[in-house]
Amino acid sequence: MEKLIDLISRRVSQAFEAAGLEASLGKVTVSNRPDLCEYQCNGAMPAAKQAHRPPLELAQAVAEQLEGETMFARVEAVKPGFLNLTLDPGYLRDYVAQMAQAPSFGLEPEAQPKTIVMDYGGPNVAKPLHVGHLRSAIIGESVKRIARYFGNRVIGDIHLGDWGLQMGLIIEELRERQPELPYFDPTFTGAYPAEAPFTIAELEEIYPTASAKSKVDEAFASRAHDATYKLQHGDRGYRAIWEHIMRISKADLQRNYEKLDVHFDLWLGESDAQADIPPMLEAMKARGIVTESEGALVVEVQQPEDTKEVPPCILVKSDGASLYATTDLATLVQRMRDFTPDKVLYVTDKRQALHFEQVFRAARKGGIVPEGVELQHLGYGTMNGKDGKPFKTREGGVMRLERLISEVTDYVRRKITENQVVDEGDVEETAQRIALAALKYGDLSNQPTKDYIFDMERFAAFEGNTGPYILYTIVRIKSILAKYGAAVDSAALLPSESKEAKDLMLTLTRFSDSLRAAYQDNAPNDICAYVYDLAGVANKFYHETRILAEPDAARKAGYVALMDLTRRVLETSIDLLGFSAPERM
């Protein structure tokens, strides 16, 4: 279904051409003066320079070509040469009625859908999720859903950190605590225990203890490095411990991501790419792009057009160890082989921008990724506290994500309990939904690349530009539909007689525009801005219109149909943001 603004632009372009001017000058935009008109065209201004005639005269000539056009209720040429356009209410009503019946509300999907691999989440196993993991999960999940809405095949991969030194640290700390375990007996040949020798809580205590010890105990650090080496080279006992770590860590991660309504298609990690590293290194050496630098193997990625230094991409350190770049390149080998993607998108902290620039250039240079495949890094800003510094607990430590979710949920639960509008049995689920909306909308309403201040009281407010306000609007509409007491007649004649009804319909037509902008720029904040505008005009329509008290049955059916379409658009939009509305609040 063609976008409304494109239909208007095409008709105005025809009028420009009929007036002897270039059709390309007829581009129309939403008016920045809604008190004067709904759409505007400024094409007469540049046309005046080409034709050497006054812009107002040219605007009037175009306006004459639009006389009698049923699309418009009014076309005005005003000084110094603007065209002010107001849509015919009937034309708008018919367009919105078509939109209500069309798949995806008339949104045009990708003509040639892409296969996109998305790398987001990125937690380390054996460590609890903390607030630093929040943005990758929330932004990545929304960007994934938006891309899928346009018909793309999108594969979300969590890309676990499961193969580095933290594994050796855990193994060595466990060996010191429980040396009698069979995993540490080189003569043991039986089956290892099915149960892990630690719980998730114990595991999350073991790692920081071991990490701190390695910084002050050189002998312990050396043994941890040795344990890492043995694990990575197939030590049977250490592999069994690693499998325990993976099993209980993944179960805990899945539980926490479920609370965020974040879902991954793949739970692969650095370990899954290890087999591809040796042949990848040999292939890159064969291409003649690997050089030695101070004992390390590197790929030079500096380009002549660079205005600042881009350091070489290090593949193997002087001690023979591989790095994140090595694993990321091997993971690209794996992804190209398994999925043949058109695009690979990474959602991480923007401070990793240089790392990905090096990896992308090395991947191109090494022939891992052909030129036709897009590699993109979406770097996000930091979630900060009210002091403007990275968000911490009251005690000054890094806050666990589970605790953050719990604190927001507790705050919302107290508010809805005080208001006493939700049945006691529904309080918990309602609190969880509102808390998730507060958390996700509070994050996503900001441009991904920007830092933002986390303010629980503001994010959880039921008024203003917040998730709970959007949910409240949806719940209010649901209440109207429930009280209507009959099935919604989707074919009912939509109302067009009031300014409030027309404003609501005009805002509904912007759905496709907001989604396409969010899709093209990986910017869920564009959808947030749209749903806030839509909620505002929907509430105004609700306040100014006697919907259920309308005595005329046909008109009432039209009001209800418009409200139902608004609900559907709002619920679709927030689903793309990653949250949903309760029945009451």
Image (spheres, rainbow, N blue to C red):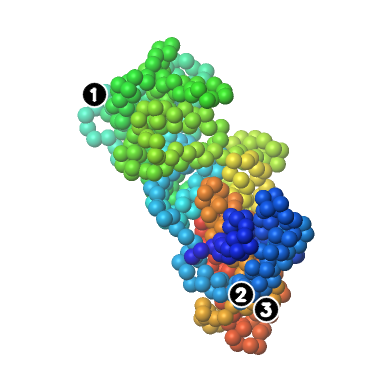
Q: Residue 70 has which mark?
A: 2
Looking at this view, name the residue that lies furthest to the top.
294
Please state which of residues 266 and 196 is positioned toward the viewer in this rendering.
Answer: 266
Nearest to N terminus: mark 2 or mark 3: 2
Question: Could you tell me residue 470's position as x and y percent?
Answer: 62, 61
Q: Residue 187 has which mark?
A: 1
Question: Could you tell me residue 10's position as x and y percent?
Answer: 56, 62
Nearest to N terminus: mark 1 or mark 3: 1
Q: Is residue 329 above or below residue 435?
A: above
The secondary element bearing badge 2 is classed as loop
In the displayed structure image, the side of residue 266 where residue 473 appears, left or right: right
Residue located 68% across and 66% down the image: 63
The residue carrying mark 3 is 497
The secondary element bearing badge 3 is classed as loop
Nearer to us: label 2 or label 1? 2
What amino acid type should be assigned to the residue bearing mark 1? Thr
**Quarter occupied by residue 167:** top left
In the displayed structure image, the side of residue 231 where residue 3 appears, left or right: right
The secondary element bearing badge 1 is classed as loop
Q: Is residue 15 above or below residue 284?
A: below
